[in-house]
Structure formats: structure tokens, C-alpha cells
Amino acid sequence: MFSGGGSATDKLVVISWNQNVLYPAGIPAEKITFKPTLRLPTGWKYGTPLPVENASGDEVAFQPAALMRLVDSPVVAGEYYRAVDITPAGEPIHHEIDLVADSAAALEMPPEMQKGLTKMVAESGMLFGARHYRDYHFLLTLSDHVAHFGLEHHECDDSRTGERSLLTPDGRRGVADLLGHEFVHSWNGKFRRPADLSTPDYEAPMRDDLLWVYEGLTSYWGPLLAARSGMWTAEQYREDLASTAADMGPGGPGRTWRPLQDTADAVPGERFGGRGWGNWERGADYYPEGDLIWLEVDTIIRTQSQGQKSLEDFARSFYGGPNNGPELKTYTFDDLVGALQAVVPYDWAAYFHGRLTSTSAEAPVGGIEAGGWKVEYTDKPPEGRGGGRFGGGLNAVYSLGLRLGGDGAVQESLVGGPAYSAGILPGMRVVAVNDRAYTSELVHDALKAGTKNTEPIRFLVVNDDYYKTCTVDYHGGERYPHLGREEGKPDLLDDIAKPLAGKNEAEPAGHEH
Ligand SMILES: [Zn+2]
């Protein structure tokens, strides 16, 4: 999937070399050298981390590269292309974002986003204290006609999003999160990689029991880079955490039968969601639940060390060392535990085993609580993702246990929730609410009215071509997750979301609070 999806339009292309090379079997991908050349449509420009040997006319000859490096270095090219330098002042290594889009207008990334990305690069340097690449290219494809995802590489990412993503605040907020995540992978995933995920060629199967580190820790640091670089506010960061905690708690009843470790182990045999049973299957929960677990690890370090240490100390030791260009240093579970132990003595192995094997109905919100906050539900829809209204659809996950598409199609019905118990299930479509043709507004009206009356809400649903009425006896009103301040506890979350750069100016000796 991912780069196997749509990758070209009339105006642009993303070239993934693995789809274009033939190579001999049985030789490690490090030991096969390619000398790639590329001929582009007249006038097109391109971006890639691959060093260029020479370019003339529409033909580009790249320097020889090992198959492993080639496959790790896609190219974006297009008629509408723009490269923006985002190297922070004083940073010796070049960073840029290469934009290709289906229109010239879509390339108009505002100056504040350039500033934010430059700060993100600076913050990554503060976090890890080292880089392991020659230079870094954010490759961003802006098109409504290609597959949308983010994919990590060592010296670039391959992120693809809607054509007008850079033109709205919501779009830019999403891009900041996506780019932060893929960027972190240069350290956590490409430089340091679980030993059994590191294979000598593309035929050997990978084993993925440590994806809760590879993706989970990246899911913790990605949004933090967005917040620390000012592209997210502290409140947006908290709202995101609240949504994650709710998704993993009441929004994910599958956690009562499926431990987190199993969601990582099952990846080779699994497609990601899409059938409407995600809350019971859990899909790729090692991403969002990893976010909560690593926040908890960070707060444990801060608490155990009386504020002398943080997860940054682990980052600098585990991902540090000299920059020899793109290099791979593998690790095991024991290496990880040892590195944490060196930061702060704690029974890390027991902690992780507990989190990875738990079938508790409760999400691991210890990090949020140690951070001075708690998950609360109010009738105020959250900003951004998980909002009350999206594309005409309905998000009533934490009230009715129901999410509907704009056409009333049941996208999610929480197993054991009020809608589920009334017989409303994925594959069905809601056609009427209290005897009137379905709109999401009607459901919101009924939820509000339900707090003051004792009438159940009647949903007329169609299942294939059979109609039935389901009555949902629910009177709790609208409910959306937020974080509320736990008075009396220090606000560690606020401290965690602050830029590291500012802290070091204030405290030249390091973070000693
Ligand atoms: Zn990732």
C-alpha cells in the first residue's frame, strides 16, 4: 500500500525507485550499486535527497548509490514546484522542503509556516543533539489525485496531502503533525531500528514486535515538535492528547480482549481498518497508544529524577553519536530498557510488559495525570480532528457510540455502546431520525433534547435492503473529550510542550527544573 497508491497526475509525479528497478537476488541491498538517471517532462523541476552528478536539459544523472540508499530516496517532480530553505541559523546541515502541487496557487506556503518548519528543524537538533544524514528534504506532494499518507526515509520523507493543505490553518496544522512525525523517523526508525525490523534485502520478512517504539515513540515526539515549533498551540496539543486518550479508552473497547503487543505483531497479516469494526479490532493502536505510553515514560523520568531528567536525556544518549551520514544502528528491547535505566533507575521492563499485555478497559492516561491534567467529557466539540461535524457526517462516539458518514452510513459503532446495543452496526445506513430524513443536525438536536426528556431516539436504518427501527434510550447529551486541569498538581504537560530552545537560553546548564 502507501507508495503503491496513486503517485502521478498531469502536473506532478512521485518516483519510488523500488517500483522502477530490477536487481539481482541474493545480494544485500547495501552491496548493489545503481547509477540512476531521470528524464523529466520539459520544464519540470524536482526535489530529492539523492546527490546529483550532473543535469542537462531535462535529464538528471545522480551519483552512484547503493540500492538501499536509492530505494530510501524518492524523487518528487512537477510543473509546479518550489523549494523552501528551512535551515535554522547556525545549523551546518542543509534542510529544505520541496513542494510539488497540481497548481501554482497551492505552493503559496505562508512565511509563518516556513518559520515554523525552520523552528521544527532547530527543535529536532535540541531534542536529539545529533543528526544522521547529509542533508534533509521534506518532500511534500499537494494533490487531490494521489494517495494521501506520510512515509519515512532517512534523508527525506514522502508526504502526500490535499492540494490546498497549505492554504488553511487546519490544513497547515495537519501538515505540521505529519511532517513532524516523518522527520522524527529519521532518528527513530531509520538511524535506530529494531534489530528484527532490519533486513539485508527486500525479500527477508521483517518482525515488528517493537513497533510501539518505532511508531509509538514517533507518535509522541511528532506532535511535540509541532507544538514546540509553534505550529500547534499548547491547547491544540492537549486537545490532540485528549482525543487520543478517549480513542484508546472508551472509544476502543477492543482493548479488553486484545493487548497492545498483539496489534504490533499482527501487522504482516493485517490491513488497516476500513470495515467499521476498528474499535473492536484495534488496528494500528501501537501508534496512538504508544503516544500515551511514551508520555507516561517521560513523566516517570521527570518525577523519579525530581525534575532533573526527562525523555530528552534518553533521546540524546540513544539517538546521539557522530553524523556519519545515513547509518543504521539496530537495537533490541533490552537495549532500550538499558538506555532508559541509565537515565533513571526504574523497573522499565516490568512497566512496558504491563502496558503491552494489559486488557484493561482503561487507556494508559498516567502521563496525562502525572502531567497535571485529566480527561474530561463536555458538550463542547473539540477543535480539529474528532470535531462534532465533519463533511456532513456525525461524530457521536462518546455519547451514542456512533460515527456516521454524510450519507448516514455507519462508519463506527462502539461495541457495547448505546447505538450498538440498539442494533445499529457497521454496514447499515441511518436514513431517518425520529421519523425525519437523516441529517447530522437532527441527531445533535435529539441529543440536546434528550437531556430534558425521557423519550428514546428512534433511528430508521437500512441493512442491505431491509429496514428496521432502532430505539436508543440515551439521555447523557453531547460528549466530547478534553483535558481539564488537575488543580494543585504542577503543569508538567505545559513544560513538556514548550520549545527546548527557549529553555536553554534561560538555563544555560540544561533543564534543571
Ligand atoms: Zn510513522
Image: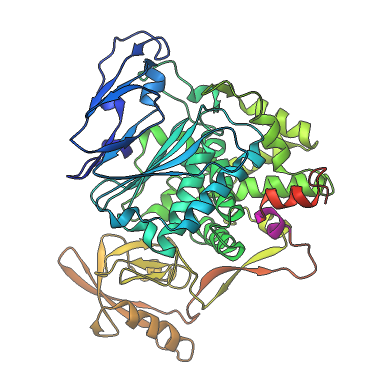
In-front residue for pair 22/509: 509
Magenta span includes 126: no
Q: Which residues are magenta?
A: 492-497
Q: Is residue 357 visible?
A: no
Extreme residue toward the front, this view: 56
Q: Is residue 236 above or below residue 459?
A: above
Extreme residue toward the left, this view: 465
Q: Position of residue 419 (x, y in %)?
A: 38, 70
Figure quadrant of residue 28 = top left
Q: Is residue 176 above or below residue 387?
A: above
Figure quadrant of residue 20 = top left
Which residue: 45% across, 91% down?
453
Q: Is residue 401 left or right of residue 40?
A: right
Q: How many marks?
A: 0
Q: Is residue 476 left or right of residue 322?
A: left
Which residue: 38% across, 85% down?
445
Main secondary structure along the magenta-highlighted residues: helix
Q: Position of residue 10 (x, y in %)?
A: 17, 44
Q: Is residue 39 left or right of residue 64?
A: left
Q: Is residue 177 above or below residue 470?
A: above
In-front residue for pair 329/411: 329
Q: Is residue 374 left or right of residue 111?
A: right
In-front residue for pair 288/426: 288
Magenta span includes 494: yes
